[in-house]
Amino acid sequence: MTSTPTARAIVPKFDDETNRERKLAIICSKGSLDMAYPGLVLANAALGEGIETHLFFTFWGFDIITKSRMRDLRISPVGNTAMHLPGQDVHFPQALAPLPGVTAMATRMMKKSIAKLDIPEVPEFLDQIVAAGGHLWGCRMSADMNGLRAEDLRDDVEAIISASDFIDKTAGAQLLFI
Amino acid sequence: MPLTMIDDHPLHVDDEGFLTNYDEWNEDIARSLANQIGITLTTRHWEAIRFLRQDFKQRGETATIRRIESAGGISVKEQFTLFPAKPAKKMAYIAGLPKPRGCV
């Protein structure tokens, strides 16, 4: 430990020019529980650093913002070779993965471990993201394919827009496809 | 660990400038720290800061913005208004606490 104070005060650099100019666009294309979270965690982190953040929900990711489906995202061990038995280095046998009840069980377990970390469920997480200034956009083509309209989506989805509109809105942004 | 001078207060801080000693803080210092980052503390700011101090004392961890909303009663939106752009880090700094460590 040093005892001489430094000449200049050490103060965190909160007014970072680079972050103020930074913009992040996240395309959420998957509707399973495990693939919904990464986009939301990153969006939330970016907003907390003062970065303008846009989320575009497309294809299966449309479920994340669809009122009737957003509380029912699931995870299935089918085809997921990284799925292990709880707390062990033993693979979950793929032959058992398609059995009835396995998806429900895996979903329950994942929800439990997420809740344990005090991380909100998907709809509440999106509430927080919007409160922090995040922008939510629905994909035109996905809406048309599913026969869904703006009133079927969360009220805070700003609009259903085309892919080209999204590209236009996020000019200069860093982009993540999930 | 560096020692820095903020106004007339000698303070132990980490490399970024966050205080490292919980007991070195007082409300006078909070005003000086807030001033360093361009924030004038209002009653509402103080409510957030006091909640963070007391919550850290109980849990040994800096509250996240989610916790400040659910347990501290200050909405995420308001936190972004009170401490613009980087509320979690700014609040932790003024409260003399480490940055929150969790991802969410």
Image (cartoon, coloured by chain):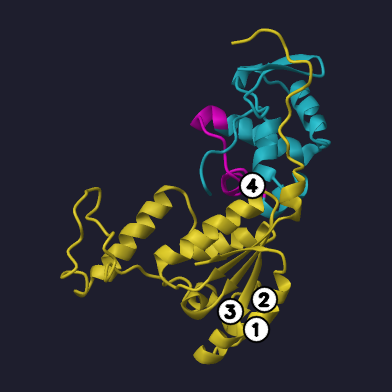
Chain colours: A yellow, B cyan
Range shown magenta: B56-74
Label 4 is found on which chain of the structure?
B
When the figure is inspected, residue B89 is found, relative to residue A21, above or below; the finding is: above
Nearest to the observer: residue B58 or residue A108: A108
Q: Which residue is mark 4?
A: B73
Is disc 4 surrounded by few (<14), some (14 to 19) or many (20+) residues within 10 Å? few
Nearest to the observer: residue B97 or residue A165: A165
Front label number (2 vs 4)? 2
**Of helix, strand and loop, which one carries label 3?**
loop
Disc number placed over residue A153 in the picture, else none: 3
Q: How far apart are the alpha carbons under marks 4 and 1?
A: 38 Å
Which mark is first along the chain, 1 or 3? Answer: 3
Give amino acid for label 1: Ser
Label 3 is found on which chain of the structure?
A
**Of helix, strand and loop, which one carries label 1?**
loop
Give amino acid for label 2: Phe
When the figure is inspected, residue A61 is found, relative to residue A140, above or below; the finding is: above
Question: What is the x, y in percent for residue A51?
Answer: 69, 54
Question: What is the x, y in percent for residue A37?
Answer: 47, 61
Disc number placed over residue A162 in the picture, else none: 1
When the figure is inspected, residue A163 is found, relative to residue B74, above or below; the finding is: below
